[in-house]
Image: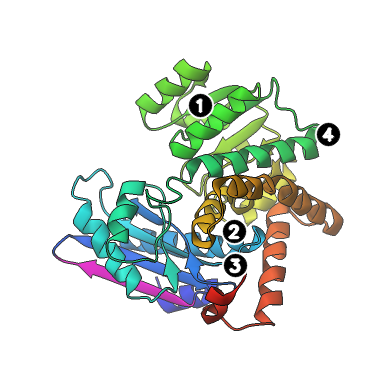
Amino acid sequence: MQYFEKIAEMGHEQVVFCHDKASGYRGIIAIHDTTLGPALGGCRFWHYATEDAAIVDALRLSRGMTYKNAVAGLNLGGGKSVIIGDNKTTNREMLFRAHGRFVDSLGGRYVTAEDVGTTVEDMDFVHMETKHVTGIGSKSGDPSSVTAHGVFRAIQASAFQKWGSDSLEGRIIAIQGLGHVGYYLAKELHAAGAKLIVTDIDAGRIKRVVDEMGATAVALDEIYRAKADVFTPCALGGILNDDTIPQLAVEIVAGAANNQLLEDRHGDALEARGILYAPDYVANAGGVINVYSELTGWSRERALRKADEIYQTVLSVFRLAKETGIPTYKAADRVAEQRIQAVRGMIKTWPQYPNKES
């Protein structure tokens, strides 16, 4: 991979490679854009097949955070960090304290948070070394329930757009991934009267949702072929691709996973099949809204009200897509880019952020 060419192509400001011999920490911090404020994005801990795969993930995820924060109306730029290794390790304190030191070395340009493979307790370790972290146990904590609520509202908005009613009573929802967000989302969907088809790599998670909510469990690969109304990806990204899209038997795709489209053209493929796609970073913005509330001092109630706005944001993206004749993923990008360009014309970058009103 030609790293500088890739960074320039994706529009990143800074990519930092970090290593701590004592703890075995190997991390990458990617800062995409700080026009709207400091780059906020979670820390993903994953056993990547290659170092290039980790770099690409950091670049894609950080770019997605720029768009997510912009569309959500937050004064934040986009960033992301990844740690390469086994996220089941019990040697976490030194690992995440090392991460905190590298985050702190950036002087506030990047604010880290929980993500796949990390926990609130991990963020507490990070907080021992830096103030540039959100989602710690003594403050807003785990953002998963707020993320799930935002996705739930995005599914409702998609239902309204597709069927003229946002009621999910009797609708069949196929959920891929039952981690923190997937579980909370399943609870909300079940309470709304939806019928659930679920899968996960963890048999224990599947059993919990089957037992508590009467869900139907299927094998990992069968979730794409499930006869359902909505496909809700809540695991890793890149799952909407040449292999999976032809298998889908749904009318709507709306979920919590980041970077669901393997490539932009797969958004076009969904459009060609008549499948309504709620752009991932619009639907799953509840989590970043939750951690933003920690930075600004918002109450949890205000964070939930802000997450409720995802319903109208998703509908506005659908309207723009219809009015301009472009796929929904492009409409979402356009909304984000318009806000970034408008602010870029007013101020420069992050140093103004602490003086801004929330």
Q: Nearer the viewer, mark 4 or mark 1?
A: 4
- Near mark 2 (Cα within 10 A), the count class, few <14, some 14-19 or many ≥20, is many
Q: Is residue 275 above or below residue 73?
A: above
The residue under the point 72% across, 63% down is 335
Query: Where is the N terminus found, in terms of image quarters?
Result: bottom left
Q: Is residue 216 above or below residue 330?
A: above
Of callouts 1 and 2, which one flags the residue occurring earlier in the amino acid sequence? Answer: 2
Q: CA distance from mark 4 to mark 3?
A: 33 Å
Of callouts 3 and 2, which one flags the residue occurring earlier in the amino acid sequence? Answer: 2
The local secondary structure at tag 4 comes to: loop
The residue singled out by tag 1 in the image is 198
Q: Amino acid at mark 3?
A: Asn
- Near mark 1 (Cα within 10 A), the count class, few <14, some 14-19 or many ≥20, is many
Q: Amino acid at mark 2?
A: Lys
Q: CA distance from mark 2 to mark 4?
A: 26 Å
The residue singled out by tag 3 in the image is 75
Q: Which residues are magenta?
A: 13-21
Q: 303 or 218: nearer the eye?
A: 303
- Near mark 4 (Cα within 10 A), the count class, few <14, some 14-19 or many ≥20, is few
The local secondary structure at tag 3 comes to: loop
